[in-house]
């Protein structure tokens, strides 16, 4: 499936007449509501944020490719014990196919690659580094919808389903990032 998707993207890029002035660059920021599944006994969403840049590369009339580079604060907290928190910070690279359903309104989907920057577990004010027990790369699927105004301002709702990030060999339990994102962005060079 991944090979077919990659082949589709490469083929689309090869045959799409893209002019440099058609590519739009922008910035975005927003809120993350993150958790790990399965995770702490009584999980709750950990509120974090994401911030970074993006580009929109038109491939066809209603289809674009949108690569992004974002800092993303994720993790989980224990609902019954506010002192227990897992903090995972990533540099994420979503590469999304963006299809415009109608003028301005789009749906998007594609792979996301997350490169672990820091991983910490905090309990009762004491923090432990858990980076050695966490995989350095998280690969998953991002799906969402967005709306872009003519002035370049845009809004996005996205859900990310990650892969197993547990790097403890003898522990069979899998921990997967699940992140709901709400973003506001702006494309700078809108014609």
Image (cartoon, grey):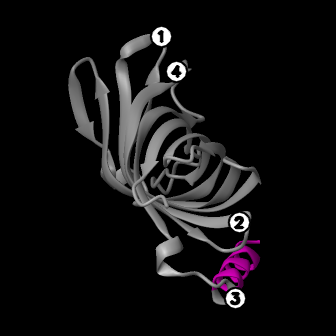
In the shown orientation, is residue 118 left or right of residue 45?
left
| Residue to which mark 4 is pinned | 44
- Numbered label attached to residue 63: 2
Q: Residue at x 45, y 55 (%)?
A: 167
State which quadrant residue 15 falls in. Answer: bottom right
Chain-order first, disc 3 or disc 2: 3
| Residue to which mark 1 is pinned | 80
Residue bounds of the magenta highlight: 1-13
Between marks 2 and 4 in the image, the one whose residue lies nearer the viewer: 2
Q: Provide the major secondary structure of the magenta segment.
A: helix
Residue 11 lies within the magenta run: yes
Disc 3 to disc 4, C-alpha distance: 46 Å
Disc 2 to disc 4, C-alpha distance: 36 Å
Disc 1 to disc 4, C-alpha distance: 9 Å
Number of other residues with Cα within 10 Å of mark 2, as a class: few under 14, some 14 to 19, many 20 or more = some
Chain-order first, disc 2 or disc 1: 2
Between marks 1 and 4 in the image, the one whose residue lies nearer the viewer: 4
Q: List x then y, in percent, for residue 19.
A: 53, 81
Number of other residues with Cα within 10 Å of mark 4, as a class: few under 14, some 14 to 19, many 20 or more = many
Chain-order first, disc 1 or disc 4: 4
Between marks 2 and 1 in the image, the one whose residue lies nearer the viewer: 2
Is label 2 in a helix, a strand or a loop? strand
Q: List x then y, in percent, for residue 6.
A: 67, 78
Q: List x then y, in percent, for residue 191.
A: 49, 61
Residue 84 against residue 12 in the figure, above or below:
above
| Residue to which mark 3 is pinned | 15
In the shown orientation, is residue 6 left or right of residue 164?
right
State which quadrant residue 105 falls in. Answer: top right
């Amino acid at each position: 499936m991944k090979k077919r998707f990659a082949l589709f993207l490469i083929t689309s890029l090869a045959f799409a007449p893209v002019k440099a002035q058609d590519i739009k660059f922008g910035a975005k920021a927003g809120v993350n509501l993150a958790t790990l599944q399965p995770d702490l006994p009584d999980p709750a969403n950990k509120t974090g944020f994401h911030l970074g840049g993006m580009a929109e590369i038109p491939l066809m009339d209603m289809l674009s490719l949108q690569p992004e580079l974002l800092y993303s604060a994720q993790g989980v907290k224990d609902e019954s014990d506010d002192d227990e928190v897992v903090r995972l910070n990533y540099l994420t690279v979503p590469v999304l196919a963006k299809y415009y359903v109608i003028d301005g309104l789009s749906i998007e989907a594609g792979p996301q690659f997350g490169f672990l920057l820091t991983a910490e577990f905090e309990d009762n004010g004491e923090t432990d580094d858990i980076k050695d027990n966490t995989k350095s790369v998280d690969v998953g699927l991002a799906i969402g919808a967005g709306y872009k105004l003519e002035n370049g301002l845009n809004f996005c709702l996205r859900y990310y389903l990650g892969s197993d990030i547990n790097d403890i060999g003898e522990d069979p339990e899998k921990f997967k990032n699940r992140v709901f994102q709400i973003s506001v962005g702006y494309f700078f060079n809108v014609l």
